[in-house]
């Protein structure tokens, strides 16, 4: 599903990823761990085309990423802080975002909001949400269109420890035979028991841990 082929990415004199390669198959959940600043977000941005590699190539379903237009991506992405409109409700925000691709209707949006443990009928404005609630809504946005690839960057940030098992469970439930899920986190324990394989990124190298 996703092939990372000899990818190198530098910023100035800092090489964040040096000639890294990996294959991510459909039907699996992958973890990506590493310290702050190790290059997890950079790798996720490369995988969704927000950044381009200096050399090497990302292939999605066999096709080089750069030759695709955004509409063809079929990726659900949560990277950094999701940019929601603070004066609108969760449902209103996702309805606006869903209007971009026009792939799903209101029922799918409601279902995604319920899936992450929020209330689609709540009148609460997203600006009044806690960080953890916003993070849940970010996950809802990433899954609402049933995309075949899910890239989630630090989905557990701001989520309280008590809610962690539930969050892991809802992500586990997103697994599907033709879906590839990649979850980046700097807290390895957060993805304990969730992933089929875990990669670590450290010193420019990508290594398969388990
Ligand atoms: N757009 C950018 N310009 C310059 N340096 C960047 C840029 N994006 C990331 N970096 C650098 O790349 C390194 C890896 O960053 P990042 O992937 O965000 O780490 P993390 O593993 O914490 O997600 C950091 O040193 C960061 O400063
Ligand atoms: Mg990061």
Image (cartoon, grey):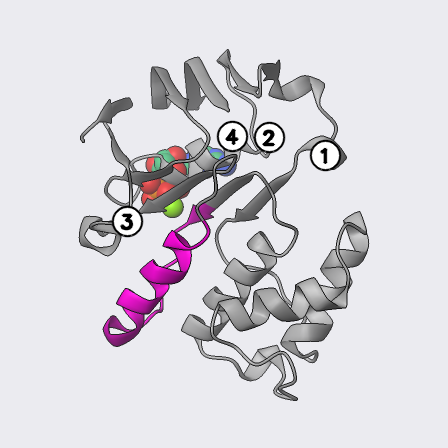
Comparing labels 4 and 3, the label whose residue is closer to the camera: 3
Q: What is the tally of numbered marks visible in this picture?
A: 4
Name which residue lies at 20% across and 48% down: 188
Q: CB of mark 2 within 8 Å of CB of mark 3?
A: no
Q: Position of residue 88 (x, y in %)?
A: 70, 78
Q: Is residue 65 above or below residue 5?
A: below
Alpha-carbon neighbours of circle 2 within 10 Å: few (<14), some, or many (≥20)? some
How packed mark 3 is, by other alpha carbons closer than 10 Å (few <14, some 14-19, many 20 or more), is some
Picture coordinates of residue 190 (x, y %)? 24, 55
Q: Which residue is mark 1?
A: 70
Kindly identify the residue that appears in the image at 61 percent across and 68 percent down: 111
Circles 4, 2 touching at the beta carbon (< 8 Å): yes
Say which element carries label 4: helix
Q: To which residue does mark 3 refer?
A: 194
Secondary structure at numbered mark 3: loop
Residue 50 vs 174, above or below: the answer is above
Mark 2 lies on residue: 49
The quadrant where residue 92 appears: bottom right
Q: Nearer the viewer, mark 1 or mark 2?
A: 1
Q: Which mark is residue 33?
A: none
Disc 4/disc 3 C-alpha distance (Å): 21 Å
Q: Any atom of ligand 2 within 8 Å of the CB at mark 3?
A: no
N-terminal of the pair, mark 4 or mark 3, is: 4
């Amino acid at each position: 599903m996703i092939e990372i082929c000899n990818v190198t990415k530098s910023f100035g004199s800092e090489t964040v990823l040096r000639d890294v390669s990996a294959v991510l198959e459909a039907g699996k959940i992958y973890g990506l761990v590493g310290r702050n600043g190790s290059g997890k977000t950079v790798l996720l941005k490369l995988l969704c085309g927000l950044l381009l590699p200096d050399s090497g190539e990302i292939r999605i379903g066999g096709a080089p990423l750069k030759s695709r237009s955004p509409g063809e991506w079929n990726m659900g992405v949560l990277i950094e802080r999701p940019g929601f409109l603070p004066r609108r409700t969760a449902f209103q925000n996702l309805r606006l975002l869903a209007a971009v691709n026009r792939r799903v209707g209101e029922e799918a949006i409601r279902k995604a909001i319920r899936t992450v443990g929020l209330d689609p009928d709540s009148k609460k404005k997203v600006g009044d949400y806690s960080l953890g609630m916003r993070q849940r809504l970010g996950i809802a946005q990433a899954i609402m269109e049933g995309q075949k690839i899910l890239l989630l960057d630090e989905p557990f940030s701001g989520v309280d420890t008590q809610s962690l098992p539930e969050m892991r469970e809802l992500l586990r439930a997103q697994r599907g035979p033709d879906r590839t899920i990649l979850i980046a986190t700097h807290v390895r324990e957060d993805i304990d028991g969730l992933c089929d394989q875990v990669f670590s990124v450290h010193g420019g190298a990508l290594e398969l841990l388990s």
